[in-house]
Image: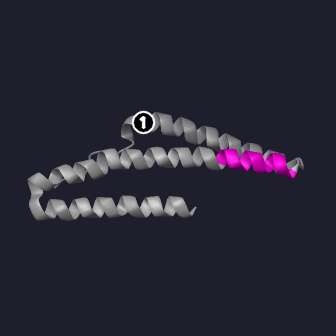
C-alpha cells in the first residue's frame, strides 16, 4: 500500500492559493476597518464574508480529500486485502473527524 504522491488538492493548488490570498486581503481589510472605527455592523458583514470564503475552501478540500485520498484507499482494498481495508477505514475516519471539526467551527 503506497501513500499518494501528492495531496488530493494538488490539481487545484493554484486555485486554492488564489482564494486564500483573496481571503488574506479581506482579513487585512477587516483590520483597517477596525483601525478606522468602521461601524460595527459593516465589520460584522465583512467577518461573515471571510467566514463564508473559508468555509468554501474547506468544502473544496474535503471534496478533494474524499475524491483522491479516500478513493485511493478504497481502491487499494482489492490489492492489499486487510491492510488495504485498515487503510481505507483510517482515511474515512480522518475525513469524518475533519468534517466534524468544520461543523463545530
> Is residue 49 covered in magenta?
yes
Which residue sits at x=54%, y=44%?
56
Mark 1, residue position: 12
Above or below, 57 against 95 in this view is above
In the image, is 85 to the left or to the right of 27?
left
> Is residue 27 covered in magenta?
no
For the C terminus, the quadrant is bottom right
For the N terminus, the quadrant is bottom left
Q: Residues within 10 Å of mark 1 (few under 14, many from 20)?
A: few
Q: Position of residue 76 (x, y in %)?
A: 16, 52
Scheme of image coloration:
one colour
In the image, is 61 to the left or to the right of 93?
right
Residue 10 or residue 70, whichever sits in front: 70
Q: Position of residue 37 (x, y in %)?
A: 90, 50
Which residue sits at x=40%, y=46%?
63
Number of residue marks:
1
Above or below, 94 against 66 in this view is below
- SS assignment for the magenta stretch, majority: helix
Say which element carries label 1: helix
Which residue sits at x=19%, y=53%?
2
Q: Position of residue 90 (x, y in %)?
A: 28, 64
Query: Magenta residues, as a range?
Result: 40-50
In the image, is 85 to the left or to the right of 104?
left
Amino acid at each position: 500500500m503506497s501513500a499518494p504522491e501528492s495531496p488530493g488538492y494538488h490539481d487545484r493548488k493554484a486555485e486554492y492559493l488564489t482564494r486564500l490570498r483573496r481571503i488574506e486581503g479581506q482579513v487585512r481589510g477587516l483590520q483597517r476597518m477596525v483601525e478606522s472605527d468602521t461601524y460595527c455592523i459593516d465589520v460584522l458583514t465583512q467577518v461573515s464574508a471571510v467566514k463564508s470564503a473559508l468555509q468554501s475552501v474547506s468544502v473544496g478540500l474535503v471534496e478533494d480529500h474524499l475524491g483522491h485520498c479516500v478513493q485511493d484507499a478504497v481502491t487499494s482494498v482489492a490489492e492489499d486485502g486487510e491492510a488495504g481495508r485498515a487503510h481505507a477505514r483510517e482515511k474515512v475516519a480522518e475525513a469524518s473527524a475533519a468534517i466534524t471539526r468544520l461543523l463545530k467551527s
